[in-house]
Image (cartoon, rainbow, N blue to C red):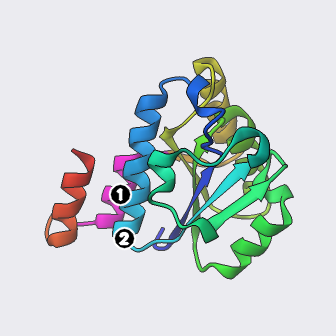
Amino acid sequence: MQNPLLVIIDVQEKLFPVIHERNVLEKQLSILVQGFQLFEQPIIYTEQTPDKLGPTIKPLSQFLLKHSCIEKTTFSCMDDDTFRLTLGEIDFDTLILAGIETHICIYQTANDLVRNGYDVEIVADAVSSRYDINKNVGLERIRDVGAKLTTVELLLFYLQKQAVGSRFKKLIKLVK
């Protein structure tokens, strides 16, 4: 992985309050997004029927560019025309998925991406569901279809490669 694309899926105001360990999830997503910005890697995000579920939560949307948002009605991002067109416009070698809910939109998107030949990694500590069992089974199913699991720190330090330089110092501050 040299050029990952981060996809944040459906972290929206009306669903977020019922998500398991939402405070931890919010922190991990924030670190992940800021880390991708530090490495100048592309980020897109989705909102599932925002007229019903609201916009992306403010603590996260403050770091995201509004033009990078894809509104969808499908569970799998791959079933959305705009999402597929957007993938064709961005240079990347690996798709990194994070967000909610693990067993629905994350799983279905990962499954469809893998079936279409993409390399996919799920950030296990930056996804969640309303119930922990759904997250855990969702992650198992995601691995079963051939996607890899990663964590926020594993991914960001992999991109960093070495413990020197100003970017490394910024990364250390970010993850503390």
* Amino acid at pointer 1: Leu
Q: Which residue lies under the disc numbered 1?
A: 156
Mark 2 element type: loop
Mark 2, residue position: 39
Reply yes or no: does residue 19 show up in magenta.
Answer: no
The foreground one among 61 and 149 is 61
Residue at the image point whose x is 78% and y is 74% from the top: 85
Residue at the image position 38 percent from the left and 40 percent from the top: 27
Q: Magenta segment range?
A: 150-162
Quarter of the figure that contains the C terminus: top left
Q: Residue at x 41, y 53 (%)?
A: 32
Q: Position of residue 6 (x, y in %)?
A: 54, 61
Q: Nearer the viewer, residue 164 or 77?
A: 77
Q: Amino acid at mark 2?
A: Phe
**Identity of the residue drawn at 66% across and 35% down:** 101
- Whether tag 2 and tag 1 are in contact, CB under 8 A, the answer is yes
For mark 1, give the secondary structure.
Answer: helix
Q: Nearer the viewer, mark 2 or mark 1?
A: 2
Q: Earlier in the sequence, mark 2 or mark 1?
A: 2
